Image (cartoon, grey):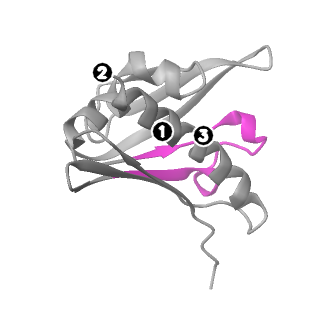
Amino acid sequence: MAEDFDAISTTTVEAPRDRVWAVITDPVAAREFMFGTELVTDWAVGGPIRWRGEWKGEPYEDHGTVLEVVPGERLVHTHFSPLSGEPDLPEHHHTLTWTLDEHDGSTVLTLRQDNNPSAEAMPHSKRMWDTLVAKVKEIAERS
């Protein structure tokens, strides 16, 4: 049986779920919380999602498919980055699941990335997502 090496990042955002949702689905905010990337999607289930940018002076385009959209509650999409060095095959794609849970007027935001190849690779992914989730929190809490 294969091991699950999911990277999970969670934070409590002092903002309502609709505000957090607006941040994670907004291409303008994505430039700020996703390391300068250009987010291109219409958020239609089954539709494409693209992240374009430059990393260490080299252009890249990551891609995925929108799998589930429950506004204000849950967003699920796949993700593949050629920067991984792996071939663009389904076994090298990740599923990212964003969940927003209301808690006493705040929002508990959790981002889960599956399909890390090993227990050693998972902490690297988690550190990256921890940074991203913290930035979403910062943006959503601005007045």
Q: Which residue is mark 1?
A: 64
Q: Residue at x 79, y 64 (%)?
A: 120
- Marks 2 and 3, the one that precedes in the sequence: 3
Q: Residue at x 57, y 64 (%)?
A: 6
Which class describes the residues within 10 Å of circle 1: few (<14), some (14-19), or many (20+)? many
> Are the residues at dot 2 and dot 3 in contact (C-beta closer than 8 Å)?
no
Q: Nearer the viewer, mark 3 or mark 1?
A: 3
Q: Amino acid under label 1? A: Gly
Which class describes the residues within 10 Å of circle 2: few (<14), some (14-19), or many (20+)? few
Q: Amino acid under label 2? A: Ser
Q: Residue at x 30, y 37 (%)?
A: 20
Q: Which residue is mark 2?
A: 143
> Are the residues at dot 2 and dot 1 in contact (C-beta closer than 8 Å)?
no
Q: Secondary structure at mark 2?
A: loop
Q: Which residue is mark 3?
A: 131
Q: Nearer the viewer, mark 2 or mark 1?
A: 2
- Marks 2 and 1, the one that precedes in the sequence: 1
Q: Quadrant of residue 14?
A: top left
Q: Quadrant of residue 122?
A: bottom right
Towards the viewer: 18 or 98: 18
Measured as percent of width and height from the top left, residue 141 is found at 35, 31
Q: Residue at x 40, y 15 (%)?
A: 28
Towards the viewer: 4 or 44: 4
How far apart in space, not on screen, are marks 3 and 1 (Cα)? 21 Å
Q: Is residue 129 magenta?
A: no
Task: Look at the image and give the residue range highlighted in magenta.
Answer: 77-99
Measured as percent of width and height from the top left, residue 128 is found at 65, 43
Q: Is residue 89 magenta?
A: yes
Which class describes the residues within 10 Å of circle 3: few (<14), some (14-19), or many (20+)? some
